[in-house]
Amino acid sequence: MSILSTILAACAGERPNNLGVRDNGLTACPNSPNCVSSRAQDEKHRIAPLSFNGNPDAAFARLKQYLSRRSDTTIIAESPGYLRVELNTTLFVDDGEFLLDKVGRVIHVRSAARLGYYDLGKNRSRMEDIRKKYTEEETRP
């Protein structure tokens, strides 16, 4: 059993220490294709931010509530208008970030694999799933 635990721990990787809010928003994606960000300038990494209606703080609170209910998501750090999460797949842990932009009326997103070069599109598909379900909750009466 300790061999399996060692393998699983190796797949999780180390929690990065370069994440968090930067001067221009979120940390830029690396050149590898295993990251998506709504702040990225290139099409390979670019993904749309989450949009919302109504009060920005209430919209961000709804996002936090939604993420708290996801079985694959653990909130690691939070500050006003910012969430950092770990996103779990079967063997790997990815890092996600959400940053509220009150003026732009969007929530910027970033998701990146901790390990490897390719993620087979997992970070993009997961963020699109989060967008879909968050939008569904946003439009409920």
Image (cartoon, rainbow, N blue to C red):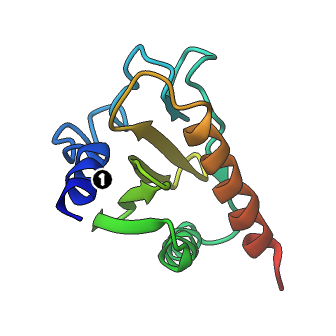
Q: Left or right: 47 with respect to 60?
A: right
Q: Residue sitting at 83 percent across and 86 percent down?
A: 141
Image coordinates for residue 63, horizontal then vertical, percent: 55, 69
Number of marks present in the image shown:
1
Image coordinates for residue 72, horizontal then vertical, percent: 50, 66
Residue 27, quarter of picture: top left
Whether residue 79 is visible: no
Image coordinates for residue 108, horizontal then vertical, percent: 52, 45
Image coordinates for residue 52, horizontal then vertical, percent: 68, 61
Q: Observer-nearest residue: 18 or 113?
A: 113
Residue linked to disc 1: 8
Q: Residue sitting at 48 percent across and 28 percent down?
A: 34
The amino acid type, in three-letter code, at marker 1 is Leu
Q: Residue sitting at 40 percent across and 48 percent down?
A: 92
Q: Observer-nearest residue: 57 or 140?
A: 140
Q: Quadrant of the N terminus?
A: bottom left
- Given the current orientation, which residue lies at the most extreme bottom position? 141
- Tell me the SS state at disc 1: helix
Whether residue 57 is visible: yes
